[in-house]
Amino acid sequence: MANFAKLGNDNIVERVEVVHNNIATDEQAGITFLQNLYNDTATWKQTSYNTFANTHKLSGTAFRGNYASVGYIWDADNNIFLPSKPFTSWTKHISSATWKSPLGNQPDLSEEQVSQNNADTHQWGYKWNESAYQSDNSTGWDLVDAKAQ
């Protein structure tokens, strides 16, 4: 089966449709089928169900960065689908088709925190705090215990 994303205003994905491979023998055949089905000239782009963060889940070839979902952004310049931008300060990371914080990846948990998570007494993790980053751009990752909330 082939999957196609319908693009709306500002290249935002409005819907995703599945077309049988007998019809979508190539991308243009799938697009033509969908345009005829809906009697419009909407822009459609093929997307891969098995692609996430520019990696193919089944060890195949990644296709267009991510499987498109409603609300995703089509980046025509880089030929990738991206989830919506999570925070103002984050930037596009083309090679992984993701967004990255200005401070990089979240910090690692300590051995003690991992141990407490495994013991099910806490659920430590890091959460991005955009307000903290905007106030002091050397901060942004807050350590939180999901079980305490």
Image (cartoon, rainbow, N blue to C red):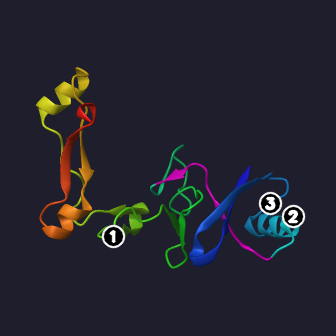
For residue 88, the mark is 1
- Percent across and percent down for residue 93 are 36, 67
CA gap between label 2 and label 1 equals 38 Å
Type of amino acid under label 3: Thr
Proximity of marks 3 and 2: CB atoms separated by less than 8 Å:
no
User: Which class describes the residues within 10 Å of circle 1: few (<14), some (14-19), or many (20+)?
Assistant: few
SS label for mark 1: loop
- Residue at point 57%, 77% (across, down): 10
- Residue at point 24%, 67% (across, down): 102
For residue 25, the mark is 3
For residue 37, the mark is 2
Proximity of marks 2 and 1: CB atoms separated by less than 8 Å:
no
Q: Which residues are magenta?
A: 41-52
**122 w.r.t. 82: above or below:** above
CA gap between label 3 and label 1 equals 40 Å
- Percent across and percent down for residue 106 are 23, 51
